[in-house]
Image (cartoon, rainbow, N blue to C red):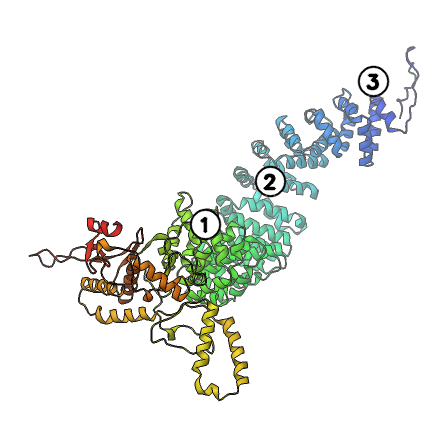
Amino acid sequence: MGKKVKKEGESPPKDVLDPLLIESKTAATVVLMLSSPEEEVLAKACDSLYKFASKGDENKATLLGLGAVEQLYKLISHEDPTVRRNAIMVFGIMASNYDVKKLLRELDVTNSLISHLVPEEDVVIHEFATLCLAYMAVEYTTKVQIFEQGGLEPLIRLLGSPDPDVQKNSVECIYLLVQDFQSRAAVRELNIIPPLLELLKSEYPVIQLLALKTLEVISKDGETRIMLGENRGLDCLLTILETDEFSDLHVEALAVLGNCLEDVHTLQLIQQSGGLRKLLSFVGDSTIPDIQKNAAKAITKAAYDSENRNILNEEEVEKCLINLLETDNDGVKVAASQAISAMCANSASKRAFGLQGIPQLVQLLSSDNEEVKEAAVTVLVNLTAASPSNASAVAEAEGIEPLLNTLYAQRDGAIANAATVLTNLAMQEPLRVNIQSHGIMSVLAEPLRSTNNQVQSKAAFAVTVFGCDADARTELRKAGGLGPLVELLHSKNEEVRRNACWAVMICASDELTAVELCRLGALDILEEINLSISRKNNFSKAALEKLLDNNLSQKYSQMGYLSSNNIITDGFYDCGQIKRGMKFSSLEELSMQALTDRRAIIFINAKPQEEQASPPGEEKAHDSSHEQTILSPSISRKSSREKTRKGKGKKEEEKSKEVIQILSAVQDEINLQNTQWLPPPDLILLDYINDASKTILPLTTTREQVVALAQFVADKMGGPIERDKLNFSWELHISEIEFELKCNVVPIGKVKKGTFYHRALLFKAIADRIGIGCSLVRGKYNRAWNEVKLVDDSPQGITGLLLPPREYIVDLMFEPGRLIKEGSVEADQYKHI
């Protein structure tokens, strides 16, 4: 580098040195020259630094370390146009370095750069100033600075520059700026659409591409889309799609069109010009995945509007989307599935997809790509909702098994939607039976354990749909699904909790499942939910009632009340009032406990012995004396085996003793493994029921039947008791029975001296068997009573008057058969005194 050589014939001043030629090969020296007062030195120094910085990022970092940026910053506003131009050139090339950009932000160079974008400046200054701004606009803070300092207007003006580099840098900077919503609104007001459309005619693909990318961003705004239509922008975009030469721009052009299709007015314009048909044909013919994917996304956006869906349906968009499902690209399949889901809101499209697309969608359920699987099953949710014909089509396409397999998918959305499709199918009884035959309840056990609220909710709802079948409930119980279902009652999510309550209500329809649900704690949780104003729901109370109605032993123990609709059946037992929070034990567990001095458990089992299940190889026996023994399961089995051996008679004696011993040992082992514990039959109670049926049922009125049954019960339990002679002799009697049986569990038929709660239970048990409606109510201090509803006779002299039934308490203790009006003083005395 050096000073300019003097002109010929020119004499230098006496106080000025002759011109010197200065050369330097070190960057540090050149940076020092940036402080020179000589314009020519400054210009040449900047030129040298530009060439040095252009060689790589390492050189830019070197200049940064030498303090070149700060010196150059002073020069970008220099009076000399050459110095100013060369300094900005260095800035533009150095701004690609991250650390340089950071320093430039600190120096706030954007304002100065924007000031040089005026028409009077050199085109080179425009080029490198816009280049520097484009590099810096990557950062959000710089975007804000450029916007606030009024940089958009000069940048938009420069889109019409004759220099392609200026155009490219300007449009790139604008593209980065419009990522922010404030800038998007501002460029619309600055009428950016015409210059951007003009750039689409550029001979440089990079400029066309940046213009399309910018249009794609700003066309997300509705008003901008209107301006695009008014400036015939849609025609430009369609022209690009129709031109094979512009194939590298097709993806971006489709993205812009995709935004435009959201507006009904715009879509109508495209349809009227034939552009929509051309667009769908173009997509159908294309084999480029990105184009197919963007087209499907464009249709999805458009399909969110009902009028748009009608227009798309008129152009038979369904055929295009179904064809896209058959491509080899997973991304295209996902995008097409999403578009179909959106179009399903149109009933005509829904029918068309049902007729043509369901087999392809079912096939996608077996895809190795989890996103494809989820997208396909989401479509099936929309297709089968309230559409029996589409639901049947899924079954005909052999979709049930793939749907069940999708319940094991890795994505929560796929699992939840698969459960929903299956419930949609189950609205038709034949399909529900078909799905159940594939073991859906066993499969649902796993989704019920999910931690995702949507999966939990849909799985619980599926249980409510399929749980209406007794075999399905049994399947769920055996698969271990009741435990996680009960856990969902704790959910803080309202929908999950509601569906879980609903499912529990459905599952509690049979006694075995209800008992298991209670064992798992469902009863306590439901009681807690119903006490909460915010957590209870329409099904929590119903679930609690259903649970107790199918587990009457626990209901009576906790609630102390059985209505006339609660029919006592074999297996019922009264273990007294249980405190809240205490475990409710089964009859088997209670029978295995050691003898205690606590209140005896009274149970009902009038099932004849021949009706009870016997272990393999055991013969049924009948105890004519009506005496039986409640023992632990192992003792019961031993006793049964002894009876078996005795019952075999002479045929056993004819066999060799060795064979007998071997067979007996093998059979004993089988019995021990396979025998399910059952309470012994109460043949005395069976006789009571038979006798009552013969003597009480023939009576003509319910009142007569109630009175007769009360007298019958009292007679079997020790007869009438005088009020002033109430004693505890019954306790001694019960204790003797317990000692005799060596068990706390006592069949009611063994009780010959019974107090209030024994008699009331026996009355209810027999009344339920012979069809007399009555309730059972537990009171305090061993009190219990039965309530019946009877219609009183019409007043004297009035005939044909239908009176409402009144409630009566049945006296079983003092004057058996006496009916006491509920609410009277006598009734209170019977309950409490």
Give the CA distance from mark 1 to mark 2: 43 Å
Which residue is labeled 1 in the image? 497
From the viewer's perspective, tell me whether residue 549 is left or right of residue 669: left
Residue 557 location in percent, x, y?
Answer: 37, 55
Give the class, few, some or many, for how many residues have Cα within 10 Å of label 2's Cα (few <14, many ≥20). some
What residue type is disc 3 on? Pro
Q: Nearer the viewer, residue 158 or 760?
A: 760
Instruction: State the SS at label 3.
Output: loop
Which percent across, then down, holds residue 810? 23, 57
Label 3 sits on residue = 37
Residue 565 appears anywhere in the view: no
Mark 1 vs mark 3: which is more N-terminal? 3
Name the mark on residue 217: 2
Q: Residue furthest bottom?
A: 654
The quarter of the picture where the N terminus appears is top right
30 or 832, nearer to the observer: 832
Q: CA distance from mark 3 to mark 2?
A: 47 Å
Query: Residue drawn at (65%, 29%), measured in percent from left and top?
Result: 146
Residue 629 visible: yes
Q: Looking at numbered disc 1 in the image, what kind of residue is underneath it?
A: Arg
Quadrant for residue 83, please give it.
Answer: top right
Label 1 crowd (10 A; few <14 / some 14-19 / many >=20) = many
